[in-house]
Amino acid sequence: MIYQRHIPREELFAAQLEMLMQNSRLAMASIHLVGILATVALFWSFVDFNVILLWAAAFLILLLLRSLHMSNALVERRFQTSPRRVYRQLLIGAALTGLVWSGVYIHASTLVPLTMQYTFLLLIIMITALSIGFSVVIREYFIVSVFTALWPIAWWSVVHYWQQPYNLLIGLVLLGLCALLVFVSNQVYISYRNMIALNWEREAISQELGDLTGSLRDRNRQLRDARRQLTDLANVDELTGLGNRRLVNKVLQEEINRARRSGAEMAVILLDVDYFKNYNDTYGHPAGDSVLQKLADVMQRATTRAGEVVARYGGEEFILVLPGASSTSALRTAERLRELVVEERIPHETSQAAKYITVSQGVVSIQPDAELQPSDLINLADKALYQAKDAGRNAIKVS
């Protein structure tokens, strides 16, 4: 049974043509060239020298044309664009080559001794049999070669059995040999076709697996990106683009653990906009949102060291986490932040601290011990913040 599952018939046929031409363009010419040389050596003494040379030259031209035709068909991929035309041309070439051999045998049978005639017949049989290895990938191609090279000799021998003593026997043997070669070629052809089909199937499966792997890789990348985006969204305040309370709690725990291991200090600044409720009541919530966005930008400009985190803790409260910062360094950052806010000169007519937006800040700097939790730091900073508010606002207090 021929294996050709899932393979389009025309595409399989084109693959057979390609394999036939790749295998036979050089092998065919080589085998027949050896046959030409052997024929010249056999008939040298019995046939006119000019006739032999003319025949050899004509045969060589035929072989060259066939090889060039196969090479051009491969280069131009005509076995895919016009496979039936290439197929017919290959059959014609095989038929002409076979007829040359059978024609020479029949013509030479009256010119050379029987030993030379039978030797030449064995040569033709060997050439035909050897070609099975490269030409049977398309069964009809090999059958044409057999029937044009051996079949005419077989019937000529049977019909002219009376001319030579073994003609009838030779004819019958050749007829049987033709049948045997056709049978063998059919088996080899099935093997070739199965091999092509299996290779095709393997390549198709490999391509599908490659596409599937690429698709899965893209999907995994998309999932990772989506997960990263979700994580970012979960940790980012929508209004200001700063981190949110969830991110702060995570960062505080990480920095506390790091400070414990290294024995370093860390600081937290908790900031609240003074009289922000009055601002919203007077100027409206959109204006209040704009103030929070401006303060977010100011706070980012106030942080200059790597690892420092700015976040919106809730409402009008902001928080800065300053890893490795001493109390002095944290106070310096808080003072810079207060000055930057004042420089913005955002009008606030209902503020009791000034006629523009101001902030109160609570600062805590500590070397974490084994018991310290993020909530403890927040509570200490919050206590300092309330002290700043009680001091009249637009102030900084240290816990």
Image (cartoon, rainbow, N blue to C red):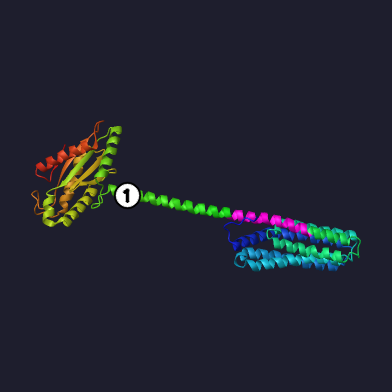
Compared to 302, does 62 lie above or below?
A: below
Q: Amino acid at mark 1?
A: Leu
Q: Is residue 188 found inside the magenta-colored segment of the image?
A: yes
From the viewer's perspective, is 20 left or right of 381?
right
From the viewer's perspective, is 353 left or right of 4?
left
Element assignment for label 1: helix
Residue 5: x and y in percent read 59, 56
- Camera-side residue of 298 and 165: 165
- Camera-side residue of 145 and 385: 145
Residue 237: x and y in percent read 25, 50
Residue at point 24%, 42% (across, down): 321
Per the image, the residue denoted by label 1 is 230
- Camera-side residue of 141 and 54: 141
In the rendered image, is residue 253 in sight? yes
Magenta span dominant secondary structure: helix
Farthest residue in the top direction?
A: 370
From the viewer's perspective, is 350 left or right of 256?
left
Which of the 4 image quadrants contains residue 89? bottom right
In the rendered image, is residue 65 in sight? no
Q: Which residues are magenta?
A: 178-200
Residue 135: x and y in percent read 71, 59
